[in-house]
Every structure is written in C-alpha cells, then in structure tokens.
Amino acid sequence: MKKLEEKIKKYGNVLTQVKRSENNAIFALVCGDTERLLGYEVFRIQKNKAFEIQGNIMAASESIPSSEQFGSTAWYYSIFSDNPEGALSRAIAKFEELETPKS
C-alpha cells in the first residue's frame, strides 16, 4: 500500500506531517502563499483498495479525508481560535483520543 506523503498540497496550501500512527495523523496546515501556519488537521487515514480504471490498475493507497468528512473522521484546530501552542495541544489530544481503543 502506498503511504501518505509527508507533504501534501491542498487547495493552494501545504499540509506537513507532524505525527502519525498506522491509522491516524496530525498535519500542520500552512498557507501556500505566505508560508504562515494556519492550524492543524487531525484525521483517520483513509485506506483505499486497488482498483482498475480504463484498463489501468491503481495501487492500494492511503489518502486524506474529503472536506465532507470533517467532524466525523477529520478535525481542524485553527491558530486563530487558539494560539499556535493551544491549537497543537488540542490536535494532539484528539490524536491520542483516536489512538485509545474504545471499550
């Protein structure tokens, strides 16, 4: 399975991996124009099976969640509602929550 890249372009911005496990990740979101930190995305890594499209085999791969999945499998912590350290602390707390097995 092809793993997520450590840097991903998204809507003109750049996501840079901060922390990851097998199933979850934290990425810093940085403005593509100014390189200013905007916040952190925490999400469950999407696992995509291999598939065929027009005779070409697409390998199994990991991907980031879609915009529609925010609030269910992805969360965003803005530095504008917290200071940068607060946003990172909240992102790490969510990551750890996702890593904790439910009983």
Image (cartoon, rainbow, N blue to C red):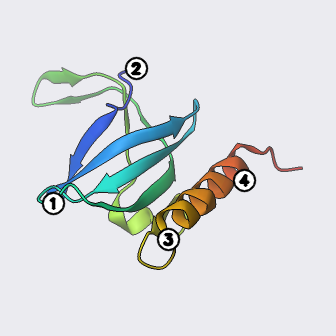
- Give the residue number, with chain letter if any, for mark 3: 83
In the image, residue 34 lies at what x, y percent?
A: 15, 60
Q: CA distance from mark 1 to mark 2?
A: 34 Å
Find out whether the residues at labels 1 and 4 contact each other: C-beta distance under 8 Å.
no
State the separation of the CA atoms marked 3 and 4.
21 Å
- How many residues crowd around disc 1 within 10 Å: few (fewer than 14), some, or many (20 or more)? few
Instruction: List x then y, in percent, for residue 13.
Output: 20, 56
Q: Nearer the viewer, residue 23 or 25?
A: 25
What residue is shown with label 4? 97
The crowd level at tag 3 (other Cα within 10 Å; few <14, some 14-19, many 20+) is: few
* Residue at 53%, 35% in the rendered image: 20
Q: Are marks 3 and 4 in contact (CB under 8 Å)?
A: no
- Circle 1 residue: 34
Residue ID at (35%, 58%):
66
Q: Say if 34 sits above or below 43 in the image.
A: below
Badge 1 marks a residue whose secondary structure is: loop
Nearest-to-viewer mark from 1 and 4: 1
Q: What amino acid type is highlighted by mark number 2?
A: Met
Q: Position of residue 36 (x, y in %)?
A: 26, 60
Which mark sits nearer the N-terminus, 3 or 2?
A: 2
Could you tell me which secondary element the residue under label 2 belongs to?
Answer: loop
Image marks 2 and 4: residues in contact by CB distance under 8 Å? no
Which residue is label 2 attached to? 1
Sooner in the amino-acid sequence: mark 2 or mark 4: 2
Q: Secondary structure at mark 4?
A: helix
Disc nearer the start of the sequence (1/2): 2
Give the distance between the C-alpha atoms of the residues marked 2 and 4, in whole angstroms.
25 Å
Going from the N terminus, do you reach mark 1 or mark 3 first? 1
Q: Quadrant of residue 63?
A: top left
Q: Is residue 26 above or below residue 66?
A: above
